[in-house]
Amino acid sequence: MKTLIAAFALAVLAGVAVPRANAQAVNNEPLDRIVAIVDEDVVLQSELDRQIGRVQAQYASSPQQLPPRDVLEKQVLDRLILQKLQVARADSTGVKVSDTEVDEALTNIAAQNKMDLSQLRGAVQSQGMDYEQFRRSVREELTVNHLRQRVVQSRVQVSDAEVDTLLKNGAMHHGQLHLGYILVAVPDGATPDQIEAAQKKAADAKQQIDSGMDFSAAAIRFSDAQNALQGGDLGWRSGDELPPAFAEMADKMQEGQVSAPLRGPNGFHIIKVIGKRDDNAAQMVTEYHARHVLIKTTELVNSEQAEKKAEAVRQRLVGGEDFAKVAKEASQDDATARLGGDLGWFSGDAYGTRVAETIKSLKNGEISQPFQTEVGWHVLQLVDTRNTDKTADLQRDQAKRMLFQRKGEDEYESFLRQIRSEAYVEIRLPGAAAPNAAPKAGAS
């Protein structure tokens, strides 16, 4: 989940922050003013304009998908407010992002845009943005990701009993769904008038889509979900990674079909089935039974000396000496030496890339040339190979991940609502939402 959360954030950032289309640089800004007060922080008009400029650049090839300027301003301002609240909470709870992490993220963003770092800097500056400011925005994205990970890990637990129940009930969805998503949010403790207004907004969104509006354009215009500015695209997900109501509804829908608004705990939901694909095939895994001798590199034994010792071990083995006897005498792997070097059965990548590459090149009974890993030099013998059906194990892992992700999304939504309700928010943008309005957490 950590990897999925980080990859999604950086991919969005790469697509928005360094657009390939010609964006309108915000060089002729009016006199700056405060458009929102967020606790001890503020959102400036210049910040809002920069973010809107990036969204407009992202949709430069299809500007008709964007809503009117005033609607877009409200959408973007809401996300800036929530971003500032999350960064502030991260700072107050000791969530830190190292310079190394930021450097790695920038390198990834450059690679995703087929650039090196110097080209990335030039592209950012060509959009009218200071590179250090861009770097700070990347740090903020990473900070929010770290905060989310900490919140989810501290609040979510998945028991074996929960996994057993899910598998026993046959509630696992095999296959993946690519969905679009619109949320019309309803605040906690909403009044009947607020609920009615949200229901009318959701109905209007559905009517506009039925009348020909592109779903992604409708998401940008109507959705309160965090992915609204990405057109509501949830990407490919296992059915079990989605809320049960979404998965059940999508199972009954055809590709391209859009659902009627569905009432949920936090508002009204509309989904579009963009695609479906099946993954019911048995999960066969190649496993290897091997044994090895390890000669460690230490302060007293350098790599060259260790390699010579490993070669001497190999000569003994190919000369006919018993492998288990040689391993007990010569191997410096404390865990396996007493077992005659036996590593047991394992999947190819269980011991790292070098072991995997070596073992896949051997035939049963063959002894490898000495090869080096981070701990020293090895001589490896492949004993046997088998193909094992790991479908049940993988389904169990999938069930646990699904439960964790589903709980994690619910918990983080609750966390966002909490920090928004506790914060002082004064919005000064004409026509925007009232202070301390409910957060638009939504699906992510």
Image (tube, rainbow, N blue to C red):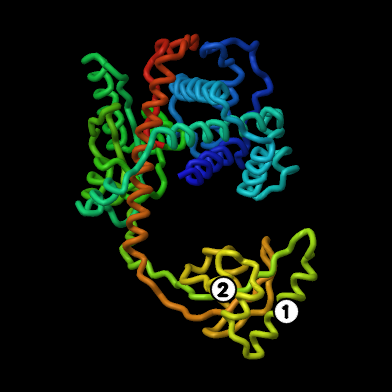
Q: Nearer the viewer, residue 406 or 82?
A: 406
Looking at the rendered structure, the kind of residue marked 2 is Gly
Q: Is residue 101 above or below residue 367?
A: above
Looking at the rendered structure, the kind of residue marked 1 is Glu
Left/right of residue 240 with respect to residue 144 in the rendered view:
left
Q: Which residue is mark 2?
A: 341
Residue 245's image quarter? top left
Q: Nearer the viewer, residue 40 or 43?
A: 40
Q: Residues within 10 Å of mark 1 (few under 14, many from 20)?
A: some
The earlier-in-sequence mark between 1 and 2 is 1
Give the residue drawn at x 60%, y 64%. Answer: 334
State the mark number for residue 311.
1
Q: Nearer the viewer, residue 301 or 387?
A: 301
Left/right of residue 154 with respect to residue 158 in the rendered view:
right
Give the residue drawn at x 23%, y 36%. Answer: 260
Residue 344 visible from this viewpoint:
yes
